[in-house]
Amino acid sequence: MQRFIRFFTHLVMAKALACTAKPAAQRAKKICAVVYVPIHEANTQNKSLKKLFHIGCYRQKAKLLSTRIAGFSRDGYIGHVPKILASVLSFLYPQRCTSCKTFVQPEEHFCRGCLPFVRAIASPLCLCCGEPFATPVGPDHLCRVCLAAPPPFRRARAWAYYQTGEATPQPLSEAIQHFKYQRNLSVGKALATLAATHFSFSDEDYDVIVPVPLHIDRLRWRGFNQSLLLSRVIGRTRKIKVDPFLLARTRSTAPQTQLPEKERRENVKGAFTVVSPKRIQKQRVLLVDDVYTSGATVRECANALSYEGARIVDVFTLARAVSH
Ligand SMILES: [Zn+2]
Ligand SMILES: [Zn+2]
């Protein structure tokens, strides 16, 4: 009901503006903002507003509305045209839960049923590979794997757990699968926004973001590279350039999730090549992928980047598979 009221209000307002603001704009040459005056203030004697927007026309419609809209916010509202359009669009195409598709508020990505099952990764975790420890208390330290064989990247972090199995709902994993295998780009957009929001490395300035590349065969099949979509939103938010042509996957490999852990490293060995070694010299690189499973893929990418002269390679993924 609230959504309907908001939409209806904006619709009337937009209609009024369409017939009033345009001639006003033509006379005044420029209008930087559209001002929506709440109903109880529509009778105001604000001459400057009247002059700009010919509120008289709008006031009549507002009066009509005033009998129907009870409890409408009387705090006033100042918005811009894009905001009005966004409200109309959000009514026509309401936001849905990224996983189960139930309706949610425009600013939400998961519904109340799914959200508790999206688990963010938190300390204590491995300082290098970011693996969260099973014990929920204690300081961060290096894990057994990183101590035995330090990875070629400096550090890796992920936003949330990538869980599989049917014991509990897995909204994030399901959303990622919708995105990748059902090619649902609207889910991808929501996930990219989440990745950018929960990006971990705010203390470092990177020269370039490199998305983990797909082999051309996989790219043709899917139609997009999910890591590139995530990279673009992170890059835009953090103002870091994204270079999807620095690294190439020169060999087609089986999906890592289909392989036992031991075979994953062999599967991606030598599969990545730096296309332009000159462009990677002394660069601080952020490598972005959707899911960190065994880490074999990002290790191989980081190996190629470091070998060709990257100064730093950090890894950020949207989600991470954890064994415990
Ligand atoms: Zn849901
Ligand atoms: Zn580790």
Image: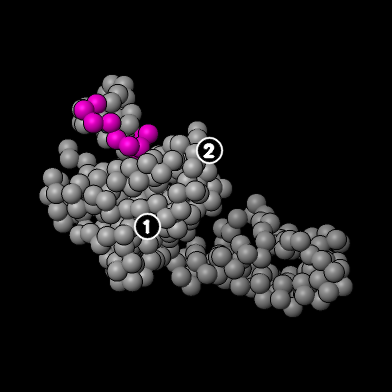
Label 2 sits on a secondary structure element that is loop
Is residue 153 highlighted in magenta? yes
In percent of width and height, residue 164 lies at: 19, 51
Label 1: few (<14), some or many (≥20) within 10 Å? many
Is residue 306 highlighted in magenta? no
**Mark number, residue 293:** none
- Cα distance, mark 2 to mark 1? 24 Å
Kind of residue sitting beneath label 1: Ala
Camera-near label (2 vs 1) is: 1
In percent of width and height, residue 72 lies at: 58, 59
Q: Earlier in the sequence, mark 2 or mark 1?
A: 2
Residue closest to the eye, 318 or 52? 318
Label 1 sits on a secondary structure element that is strand
**In the rendered image of this protein, does residue 96 appear above or below residue 139?**
below
Kind of residue sitting beneath label 2: Asp
Residue closest to the eye, 257 or 7? 257
Residue closest to the eye, 151 or 134? 151
Question: What residue is at 16 percent from the left and 56 percent from the top?
Answer: 258
Cβ–Cβ under 8 Å for marks 2 and 1:
no
List the residue tagged with mark 1: 248
**Mark number, residue 205:** 2
Label 2: few (<14), some or many (≥20) within 10 Å? few
Question: What residue is at 15 percent from the left and 46 percent from the top?
Answer: 261
Question: What residue is at 59 percent from the left and 68 percent from the top?
Answer: 85
Any part of residue 318 in sight: no
Question: What residue is at 45 percent from the left and 36 percent from the top?
Answer: 311
Q: What is the magenta range? A: 147-160
Question: Which quadrant of the structure image shows residue 48?
Answer: bottom right
